[in-house]
Amino acid sequence: MVADLTAQAPPPAEPTQAPTATLPPPGPTPDPNLPVAVVPTPAPGEPAAIANYNTAIFSGPGENYVFYAAFLAAALPK
């Protein structure tokens, strides 16, 4: 019976190609007018800084400068 139903089945429809849209890359689009932060690489195995409190690092003396990073103080394991 299955063979009879399979023989009488209509042929499969031709697949149609849906148009594909090009998606933008994930994340924000960089602004070419903003300066790029250059952060030096510390020597291997040595700390570059120790933060005792939560600290924000800017490229100048105020919050209107480029933001480099944030140090978040955490309890050290005993």
Image (tube, rainbow, N blue to C red):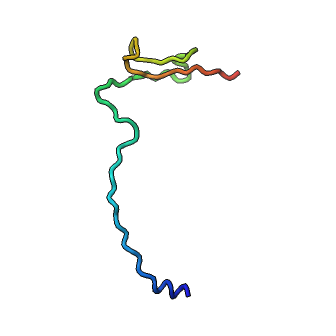
x 45%, y 18%: residue: 57
The residue sitting at the top extreme is 61
x 35%, y 47%: residue: 23
Decide: is 5 above or below 53.
below
- Taking the image as shown, residue 33 lies to the left or right of residue 7, namely left
x 36%, y 72%: residue: 14
Q: Position of residue 36 (x, y in %)?
A: 35, 25
Q: Position of residue 31 (x, y in %)?
A: 31, 30
Q: Which of 22 and 10 is in front in this view?
A: 10
x 61%, y 21%: residue: 74
Q: Which of 26 and 77 is in front in this view?
A: 26
Decide: is 77 above or below 1.
above
Which quarter of the rendering shows the N terminus?
A: bottom right
Decide: is 64 above or below 18.
above
Which quarter of the rendering shows the C terminus?
A: top right
Quadrant assignment, res 30: top left
Q: Where is residue 19 in the image (x, y as percent from the top left)?
A: 32, 58
